[in-house]
Image (cartoon, helix red, strand yellow):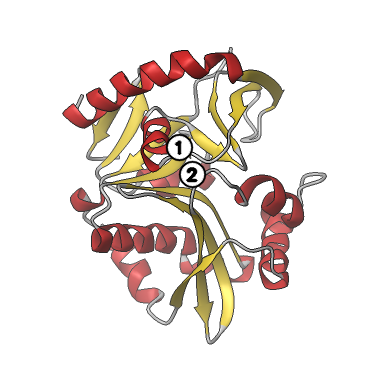
Amino acid sequence: MSLYDRRCDQEFSLIERQLDRYFISMSMDCPYQQPYLATFYQALFGPLTNHVMELFLAAGYRRNGNSLYTMRCAACAACIPIRLVPAEFRPNRTQRRVARQNSDISVHFNSVQMTEENLQLCELFLAERYPQKNNTALGYYSGFFLNHIVTSLELHYRKDGRMIGNGIIDIGENWMNAVYFYFDPDEAHRGLGTFNILTMIDFCLQKKISYLYLGYYIPGVSAMDYKARFLPHYLRQGNEWRRHARN
């Protein structure tokens, strides 16, 4: 375990003891289509300092709206937090090809907004990829993306002025948190999920941000395989971040 992670764990253990009484466990069908009951251990928060959010991310927590949560499923431990250290990353051949293939795309930073353009593209993506009942763009923005806990931004990806992808991120002094990415299903051939991560890595390098959190990696779930292709990466296993330099 690195000195940074050791310090984070020590500080977080103090916070965790103080806040544990505010957390509740909520069980539901697994949102990642695993055949087990999913249990979210979560609590609502007001605005957090940059450092406190950093400690939660380093402890493997995720953000959903104004809630922070971690998975405490009784029969499953498939959800593994994954992060990158941008300064260590070296693109492979496929990732370099994706960067070249998307060199015609312009990238714009924006505040998170429930605009008609955003809602239409998000709705198109959800209908194609996750057509479950009550899965709506309005619900994702109002209950998931928008928040008053941390600073959040959108990364708009445009081709000839038309938005074809949008990444929701949280950002702090020394960390970036990838919240969600949606895109035009007709542009799936571009590898926009990979391009989004490459863009975030470049931004982190420019701003000297040390840690990029990519959410969960679930082995065997094809929609998440591309995350593990970024090497080296770190997986939080056994309450510590373990470095993986090959797939």
Residue 134 seen anywhere in this rendered image of the structure: yes
On the rendered structure, is 174 left or right of 165? Answer: left
Q: Is residue 12 above or below residue 46?
A: above
Q: Is residue 157 above or below residue 51?
A: below
Residue located 65% across and 24% down the image: 35
Image quadrant where one finds the C terminus: top left
Residue 130 seen anywhere in this rendered image of the structure: no
Residue 173 drawn at (x, y percent): 32, 50
Residue behind mark 2: 224
Q: CA distance from mark 1 to mark 2?
A: 6 Å
Image quadrant where one finds the N terminus: top left
Q: Quadrant of residue 14?
A: top left
Residue located 25% across and 64% down the image: 206
Furthest residue in direction bottom, as rendered: 160
Of 148 and 85, the residue lying toward us: 148
Q: Are marks 1 and 2 in contact (CB under 8 Å)?
A: yes
Residue behind mark 1: 217
Residue 2 drawn at (x, y percent): 18, 28
